[in-house]
Amino acid sequence: MEDKLAIIVPYRDREEHLNIFIPHMHSFLKNKGINYTIFIAEQTDDRPFNYGKLCNVVTKEVGEEYTYFAFHDIDMLPISDECDYSYPDVPTHLATNVEAHENKLPYPQYFGGVVLISREDFETANGYSNEYWGYGFEDLDLLYRLQRSDAYLEKFYDLNQTYQRYDEDDILPYRIENVDVSNKLKSHTLEGISIPKESELKARINGVMKKSISKSFSISIWFRDSSEIDSNKNVVSLEGMDSGLFLDSGKYVIAQVWDSDKKNYDVSLDYNKNKWNHLVYSLNYESKSLTLYCNNISNTIKLPSNFNIHPYYEYLKISNRESSIDIASMVSFDSVISDEVVSELFFNGFKTLDLIKNKNGLTPVNLFDFNSKYSNDLILDRGTSLNHLMVAGKLTPLTEDVETTSELYLPVRLDGKYKSLVHPDDSDIIKNYYKYNPDVEENADIFFNEVIPNLLDYKKIGLSTLEYKILDKQNRKTYELVRIVT
């Protein structure tokens, strides 16, 4: 059977664009050897526009002779041969170079504009969700449906682990533009210990280390908080006025410092409960600032111009007797470390220390792999300060691999160039996501809080649960008009 294409165009109140789009498509596809029909899916009711549902309706209404679909924005006009509307063996994204988007993807997982997909792949994924009214997210949802229904998508990795960085104070809890695509999985091995209640590690601060913390310094450490939620947990601190890294209420990590006037300053970030987290505490005397990094995200607080750290620190302490925590791969430097070095430690762990030394001239003041011990009473510091840790209580050694990227699945993309029929707010999709709009917020809530954590069964929302009314179908010679009540 010859493959036949249904070009499905969701539509409402855009007659000026329709009158340009239809002749342009026929002209572009002429002599391309493609058997096709253009279907204009017009939403006739006054409910918010539902792109995905309109696409679903037409795929239900057209005959089985249509073996594949192009879901097509009406304001995108193909202008290059890379806009190939031939039968796709796998889900394919065509609109990758759109004039209104400055010829680049609005965000890395963008799957809108023009999408080609076989009937088999679309039906196996149960089509689009019917639940996205108004602006946004139906394309991202479809991408996840295709992934979970085992359609072919290309596997990449997100260096930013975007969907693990929840921000309840943002308009959207995850910023989709922050996805950083890589074709390489990054992981490394953590050497550490599990520290139960009634146990801790402590070292009297010797002269070498005391000198290092009297000026700019940085501490890098991994931790996992899997126990009960406490109001406050010590990760690592300089005991006396307790400057260091602390956990608050099972959600926040706090970097704190006390000055010589016994006044404290702190900065915080969210951390991931029950997962390994990488922290860097960086005190900069030159810029008078304290910076906290958590999983390669930073937050900085400015300190007074006359700031001096409180001088009476007697012990370096890891954990405390009131709580339990897992700790691994701790290293400190007698200088502020750059974002580049922080990223190296996050992505590559201790295996990058030689590179950091050779490239950046940084030698650790403290270096604890928690695997170097003297009997069971002392954990050896392999840094220049030799500030060994005394063991109080019973510790359990652990060795675990940590992945510092998360899996990301993207469609096959062609380098299709599209001219735009410009309309208001067309040029910046991301800005539209972050404007206050109740429809966007509701759609975001569905996608981020139900789809991403896989709490919705895609098989139960989509083509299988489609409810609609057809007002009429009209043959307009150059296209088919399907008027739909959603």
Image (cartoon, helix red, strand yellow):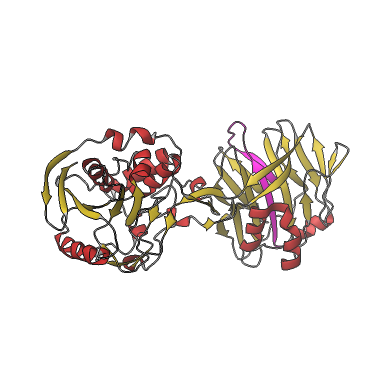
Q: Residue at x 56, y 58 (%)?
A: 300
In this rendering, position of residue 14 left or right of residue 350: left
x and y, in percent, of residue 84 in the image = 35, 61
Residue sitting nearer the eye, 386 or 277:
277
Residue 258 visible, this angle: no
Q: Residue at x 79, y 60 (%)?
A: 211
Q: Residue at x 67, y 46 (%)?
A: 222
The answer to if 54 sits in the magenta stretch is: no
Residue 378 visible, this angle: yes
Residue sitting nearer the eye, 272 or 384:
272
Residue sitting nearer the eye, 100 or 116:
116
The relative height of residue 299 versus residue 390 in the rendered view (above or below) is below
Q: Residue at x 57, y 50 (%)?
A: 405
In this rendering, position of residue 466 left or right of residue 324: left
The answer to if 230 sits in the magenta stretch is: yes
Image quarter where the C terminus lies is: top left
Residue sitting nearer the eye, 373 or 252:
373
Magenta stretch? 215-237
The relative height of residue 173 versus residue 375 in the rendered view (above or below) is below
x and y, in percent, of residue 59 in the image = 26, 44
Residue 106 occupies quadrant: bottom left
x and y, in percent, of residue 253 in the image = 58, 45
x and y, in percent, of residue 94 in the image = 36, 59
